[in-house]
Amino acid sequence: MFAIKSGLRVGLDIGSHAIKMVAAEKGSHGKVKLVQALSRDLYTGQDKYDADGPKKTQVVPLLLEMFQELGVRPKRIAHLASCIGGLNQAAKEIRTIQLSNEDMASSILQEARKHVPLDGSESVVDYQIMGEDPKEADKVRVIVAATTKRQFDAHVDMLREAELKPGIIDLEPLAAANSYLGHVELLDDGVVVFLNIGARRTNLLLLSRKEMFFSRDLPVAGYNFTEEIMKKLNVRFDEAEQVKKTQGVSVKPAKTTEGAGGYEGLALAEKMAMEKLGDEINRSLRYYVKETGQSFFTHMEVVGGMAECRDVMDYLASKFSIEVRAYDPFAFMEGVRDVRHRPQYAAATGLAARATAL
């Protein structure tokens, strides 16, 4: 007897710090209707954060638990979109002459090896033609996305271990950006700074209707802030995470409390991670201006856990003299109620929208 497949569309973001899942269905007027949004931290208690990413033995039990809460067996999900994050993935815009589909695929693979640095191993490459190059009539703009076969196969193996049938597989930065680009019309002039502050790395995307698509991974992210707190307070990872979530990264109390009576009185005067993040963003923006001549950055959309950290948001707004917003990826969905920590779900909502289109 054949099992009836579920009509749910599931977007699954297996991050380096947490798993985010968005289950949706087709709503009215072409919108996506939220069924449930779920999140599970990969590291709890005294677990030590693994900078190389979570292992399958950590991820699979949590996936099974999440689908149990959703009330659907994983093998019944017919419409699944997931994403690959981490270090060995990249996206870049290239300009190339218009070719047939077969020749274009071969040409893109060769170009990707030049422009998208990975770890030197065999690559998995996909691309999307964005349209004609406004500066050179005989060329087209192409977004190239690549990861290593090793990472791609490990991702697929993890899904199958959880009894999921792999569907659409995207890169995490592009999935997050799609949750924004699918609903917001870019202006004719100016560039949106889309900042995805993850646990291991920060991805900066520069989005423009006319100018070059730009993506760069920055070597400063949420874990760097947590690590600073761990060192300054001599506390465990989970304790430092709690301080970061509840008190921010630059607590400035009115008085100092001595002894081991909690965190009141702590002042994190040295904002090393904050300054490094600002420097990396500034370096990227200066490079973009040099390459394109475009220096009008309209505003900054921030996603990821640090988007809820007021210290970071205020610092970015002050440093770059720009409006900085915490992006809500559920703003364009129906049926959304009490979903907490919304900026963390950007990739998962973008993936759910792609799965809904299947």
Image (cartoon, helix red, strand yellow):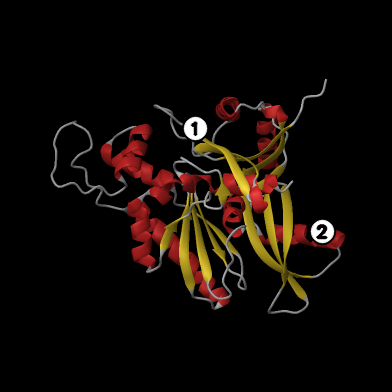
Which residue is located at x 54 percent, y 78 percent? 293
Residue drawn at 56 percent across, 71 percent down: 187
Q: Where is 82 relative to 160, above or below?
A: below
Residue at the limit of the structure toward the front, as seen here = 28
On screen, residue 209 versus residue 242, left or right, reads: right
Residue 62, compared with residue 284, is above or below; it is: above
The residue shown at (82%, 58%) is 106
Q: What x and y, as percent, mark residue 28?
A: 65, 49
Q: Residue at x 69, y 66 (%)?
A: 94
Dividing the picture into quadrants, the one containing residue 259 is top left
Give the spatial CA distance, label 1 vs label 2. 39 Å
Choose mark 1 or mark 2, whichever is in front: 1
Where disc 2 sits, the SS reads helix
Structural crowding at the residue carrying mark 1, measured as other residues with C-alpha within 10 Å and reported as few (<14), some (14–19) or many (≥20): many
| Dot 2 amino acid type | Ser
Q: Is residue 251 left or right of residue 122?
A: left
Q: Secondary structure at mark 1?
A: loop
Q: Are marks 1 and 2 in contact (CB under 8 Å)?
A: no
| Residue closest to the eye, 268 or 308 | 308
Question: Does the rendering let one see residue 288?
Answer: yes
Whether residue 117 is visible here, answered yes or no, is no
Badge 1 is on which residue? 42
Q: Amino acid at mark 1?
A: Leu
Q: Is residue 297 above or below residue 50?
A: below
Quadrant where the N terminus is found in the figure: top right
Q: Where residue 96 appears, x then y in whole percent?
A: 75, 69
Which residue matches tag 2? 106
Between residues 326 and 149, which one lies in front from this camera angle?
326
Q: Is residue 74 left or right of residue 57?
A: right
Residue located farthest toward the top when viewing the structure as drawn: 1
* Disc 2 crowd, CA 10 A, few/some/many (<14, 14-19, 20+): few
Q: Position of residue 184 (x, y in %)?
A: 57, 62
